[in-house]
Amino acid sequence: MIAHLDHLVLTTSHEADCIRFYTEVLGMQLESFIGGTPPVERRAFKFGQQKINLHVKGREFEPKAHTPVPGALDLCFMASIPLDDVVQRLNKLGVDIVEGPVLRTGATGKIRSVYVRDPDLNLIEISEPASA
């Protein structure tokens, strides 16, 4: 019945810092679009064939999660570059690595991951397929 994830919604308390983290640190593309009733400008981070819609705490769009709160997500992204290059990029940008690289189990098999936190303290796992 379900084919793939199209988008998810991230709630932030720190809009500018959140935008910087997802665009500059993770390399996602910031997109603005008109949505909702009445129509209003919204923002999202695009990557691959998915996106993360951005809600700002206290200015969420309807409908929304029952209790949207910043810092409640634990997301895993597959990297488009080798994980060692990801680690170098994170170090260069001064992003603290919480854990890793470590071996984990992903949706389609073994992965090698590092963990960081975004400005709202969501846990962000960045991974690559583990070598056989």
Image (spheres, grey):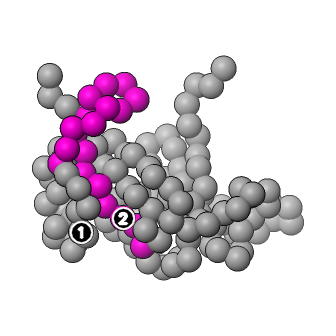
Q: Is residue 124 above or below residue 107?
A: below
Residue at image location 37% in from the left, 46% down from the top: 77
- Quarter of the image with the N terminus in it: top right
Residue at image location 75% in from the left, 64% down from the top: 61
Whether the residues at callouts 1 and 2 have beta carbons within 8 Å, the answer is: yes
Q: Is residue 70 above or below residue 49?
A: below
Residue at image location 34% in from the left, 50% down from the top: 125
Pointer 1 local density, CA inside 10 Å: few below 14, some 14–19, many at least 20: few
Q: Secondary structure at mark 1?
A: loop
Predominant secondary structure, magenta span? strand
**Residue 26 located left or right of residue 99:** right
Which segment did they paint magenta? 101-119
Q: Amino acid at mark 1?
A: Asp
User: Quarter of the image holding residue 113?
Assistant: top left
> Where does label 1 land, which residue?
96
Q: Is residue 103 above or below residue 36?
A: above
Question: Picture coordinates of residue 102 (x, y %)?
Answer: 19, 44
**Residue 11 located left or right of residue 93:** right
**C-alpha gap between disc 1 and disc 2:** 8 Å
Q: Amino acid at mark 2?
A: Arg
Q: Secondary structure at mark 2?
A: strand
**Residue 110 located left or right of residue 91:** right
- Residue 117 numbered tag: 2
